[in-house]
Amino acid sequence: MVAGGRTFNVQVIRLAGLTSPLAILRCQLIDAISSLAPTPDRYQAGVEFPFREKEFRFIAELMHATTGIKLNTSKMNMVYARLVRRLRDLGLSSFAAYCALLRGPDGEEEMGHLFNALTTNLTRFFREPHHFDHLRDVVVPAILSRSSRSRRIRIWSAGCSSGEEPYSIAMVLAERIPNIDQWDARILATDLDSAMLATGSAGLYPLGAATDIGRGRLDRHFIKTGGNLRVEERLRRLIAFKPLNLVDPWPMKGPFDAIFCRNVMIYFDGETKASLIRRLSGLVAPGCWFYVGHSESLLEPGSDLVPDARTVYRKEVACH
């Protein structure tokens, strides 16, 4: 990582169990940023909390080093808007004080709140519906043909947010495989944001979330409770919600029949994106599928993922 013209060889930090390397990194970043030539203050007059470019750059470098997410100066107002509530909750008077907290002894604990505030969680059930049509019409029939004996299904929803994506996947599986309970079927749902993972694990959503579900699916897979909808237990058993920073080492080995990593890589710089694609491709089973978001593409030279449908890629070697 480069900050202030200085290069740091920093091992990427895990979200769970952040330890001393992060404290070292925070201090290195502050030293590097402090040595930069002065820049004009970028905060507007009259805002509740003073926010200078120096503080923005510290937060941006810290996010990039620990998550791979790139925040350029055009995101300064967004960072301010997403962190003001946290500053109020902490009783702080400025972003300088918040940066001091991040680099101090309580900074490791605060990092989780920083990640939750700055990661984007826009999602809904059956978002980009052509992906779920492809899952239903192409992937599931292939699994049924290939895995009729082992009855093993593994799908990963990477960057699952509050759970709508993995539950959409689970609905497709349950509808196409009526005896899904008799299969070794698991959907891994991972995200950086612990609050979103808690929502997904609970499987409880407001009634307004039903807009993209359809009446038939709503009746089959949800239970109305007060002003909310709860996902049926049968679907919830298929999914394991786990915290994961995508730029960290991964505990799972695969292979997966399908990986959904949609609208995630747009937040990474080119080097981080290329590395992530290589790692994800390594966990896709031969001949199986990888889904990306509507504004993403995989054009890396030498990639073994080839286009199969709109924003759907398939690993070249045929499944056995």
Image (tube, rainbow, N blue to C red):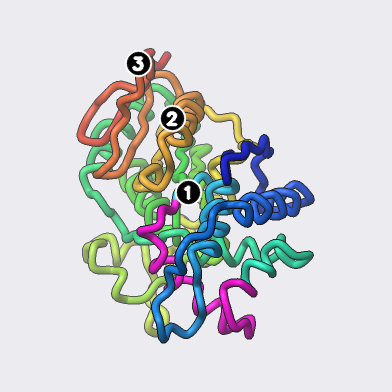
Residue 33 image position (x, y, % from top left): 60, 54
SS of the residue under disc 2? helix
Residue 158 image position (x, y, % from top left): 46, 45
150 up-or-down from 98: above or below = above
Q: Is residue 112 left or right of residue 171?
A: right
316 up-or-down from 174: above or below = above
Give the Cα separation between the discs numbered 2 and 3. 18 Å
Magenta-colored stretch includes residue 157? no
Residue under label 2, please give it: 274
Residue 13 image position (x, y, % from top left): 67, 46
68 up-or-down from 198: above or below = above
Q: Amino acid at mark 2?
A: Ala
305 up-or-down from 229: above or below = above
Checking the image for residue 69, the label placed there is 1
Q: Nearer the viewer, residue 257 or 12?
A: 12
Residue 210 image position (x, y, % from top left): 28, 68
Residue under label 3, please give it: 316
Residue at 43%, 35% (x, y): give it: 273
**Main secondary structure along the magenta-highlighted residues:** helix
Residue at 78%, 65% (x, y): give it: 105
Q: Read off the magenta span.
A: 71-97
